[in-house]
Amino acid sequence: MNSRPRAPEGTTIGHLRGQLDHLRLVQLSLGTSSTHLLTLCIAALAVGIGARKVFHVSVILCLLLSISIVILLCAYACVGDPRKRSEAHGFGSEVAQLFRAGSSDDAAADDKDEASSISDLSSEETKLLQYFRSITVELTSETHIFNTWSMVGGGKPGVGAQEQLSFTAIRYHASFLCYAVATIAMRIPSFSHCGGEIIFWVLENLLLKPKVFEFYLHYWPELRGKGPFECRENIMWLGHVAHVAALYEMLTNDDRYSKRKGLKVTESDGKSYSTSLPELALHLAASMRINATGGVPCEPGLVFFQCQNHPFCAFTLLEGLGHFPRGFFDEEKHRFQDFAVKGMRAVVETGGIKIACVTTKQNNEAFDKVYYRELATLENRLVGTASDTSTNTNTNTNTNTNTNTNTNTNTNTNTNTNTNTYQSPSRILASLPFAHIGSDAWDLNYFFFWATSTAAVEKIYSNFVKARIDDLREFGTWGDSSPDSSPSPPPCCKSKPLSLKGWNSSPPAVCCFGLNIPKSAWSSALLPVLSQTSDLQNYHLVKSWLTLNLRQQHQNKAWLGESCEWEIGNTANYAMAIAMENGSDFRKLHQGGWRGKMDGLKVLNCEPRDLRVYRCKSVIENEIEFGFIGGEISDTTLAKFVVKPSSSQKVRILKWQSLPTNLDLESTSFENGTVEIRVVTVEESVGIFGGFFSSSSSTSSLEEKKELGDDSEEDEGWTGKKISFTVNFINV
């Protein structure tokens, strides 16, 4: 079904047409005629009037009863498998055809971009990275960690109630931070330590800690003694763990989490459980195959579109890393995409994509047999003992669908047999009819990174989401973005007045159904989507509102101010959008297109901690061009040089240049694998310096130390104060 033409704005007829369009969707969902639907509404009103006469209730109660019956009728539209009424619940044939056609930027395509085309980090990106460092690797104790990461994730409805249940839980903030860091750090690929150090810290100190993951026992108490990795649901934690760990390996070449028992958690009672990243991926894929939607539930039985993005992103990364053959998880991708195209359109057009579907709970004995069957199918596929088609035939003997599967061509097997060959007790019980702009933002942002067609994702945005965003803009949701204007109140949610920290919004309701989401949250989540869809008008408006009203800065750090329940996640989404604006292609990183840039000479460390690296890339093989803005050195003072290992045991300065000539090379020395270059200022003015040098060997650790003049608190001029910095290099 094509997108609904927008009714003329500002007219009564236009508003009536809009209401009739919504009624038409409800009619389609009920699978009934317009006359039948009108009859039902009249019957509801008659029942209300009759109740008033019989029971002598007020007219208001009569109307409430009438409205309640109509709402129940609308709710009926959401019962069962929405694909049976795909005209109302689907995104239409145009989107379906685009998905079938695929993208022109397939993962197998070679990356032809030259390393020199990688743009340097902007000043804003380096400040955002410093903020992320300050709330991760620079925290020195568990007390400091959980004082900073103090979000309760949905609040406490009662004394002793379970925390970390809603979408402000620590797991979401931590994961979003990692995605933002990776989006920025991918543009300085030779400085893997920059992003990798932060992501590793988040995994070890947050995502794999009991405070973050033990909420699973609240939903699945039967797993006590078995561990969280055994759950066939809980994609709201397992999916992020897989995605973040795969990103870490892509950025650093460190495969520790892919090794046997590489992913390990220890619960509060001291019991430990482990798995590996490839094993977790197979487990998640098997859990998808036993679900009627092709996804994995978050809470028991609840399949949220946004949470499916992260395991699929992990699958794509793992294929790029070589842990699975390219296209290994295509069948699972196509199956969920097919369901989404036919059944995930929001009937109530508060946005584009339904928030969730209700399916049969699958973490129980009834699913044991089918789960292990599907896991065996995937394992056989991996070792190459059977093709996808023959595997389905072997595992589904005695069913009538086997012969149909064999008669299909290879290209049609994934799309034509997905809903028929998966024998499982899973059923789609209902789907929520409405959407939320914040949910749409999460859905589409990460969908771009793994979807088989980016054009299809863009079409969903332009046909089914953009109109709602345009409505919000016309409504004045983001004001006129002038510093003197007061931010307009967030629609459909409550926030405390704007303060120095931002909105200081309260946490959402318990569970992921809470809709009291502050405008700061869904606006920042929307920003990367607007960037990827090139919706520049809305992008610049939303970005201006965020920066003018919420952006905070202290020293070399920048963030979006909010209460602790929202601040880190908001800042991460904002940072991801800024990185995309400056050239980061996160889809290409997921698809493996940047894999070559992750190899070769690496910068392992950079001290002091407040150095802001803006350039670290390999322009020529075995060389690194490295640039930084030193600690308290002003943004106009940049250090840059090229490192080139050689077999010589001597240090030779190949080229040294100062612009302007206010720096003087004082001395150089080489001892015990350490290169020390001492530079002093000649005059009190801002300077840029660069040098080219070679040293010992391509496999040795190279340490480079320089002392530079520091600037004053002004943006210009030197004070004569000096700082020291150290950079460690290694060829991998």
Image (cartoon, grey):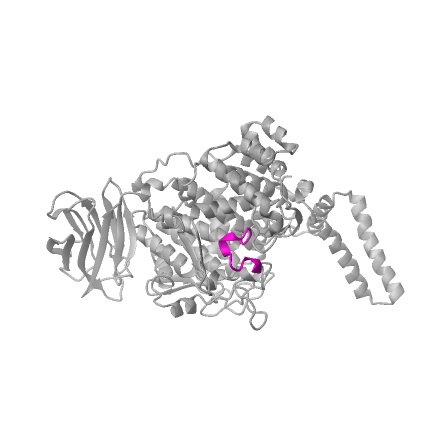
Q: Is residue 368 above or below residue 391?
A: below
Q: Nearer the viewer, residue 614 or 606?
A: 606
Residue sticking out furthest to the bottom: 159
Residue at image point 37% right, 58% down: 201
Horizontal and vertical percent for residue 513?
60, 59
Q: Nearer the viewer, residue 324 or 508?
A: 324
Residue at image point 35% right, 53% down: 196
Give left or right: position of 684 versus 346. left
Residue at image point 42% right, 43% down: 318
State the quadrant of the N terminus. Answer: top right
- Whether residue 495 is visible here, answered yes or no, is yes
Q: Nearer the viewer, residue 84 or 393?
A: 393
Q: Is residue 324 above or below residue 440?
A: above
- Whether residue 97 is visible here, answered yes or no, is no
Quadrant of res 724? bottom left
Residue sticking out furthest to the right: 54
Kindly report the secondary structure that dominates the magenta region of the rendered protein.
loop
Give left or right: position of 387 versus 718. right
Horizontal and vertical percent for residue 97?
57, 34
Horizontal and vertical percent for residue 508?
56, 64
Give left or right: position of 87 versus 146. right
Q: Is residue 86 above or below residue 511?
A: above
The span picked out in magenta is: 220-234
Q: How many marks?
A: 0
State the quadrant of the C terminus. Answer: top left
Residue at image point 34% right, 38% down: 113
Residue 71 lies in magenta, yes or no?
Answer: no
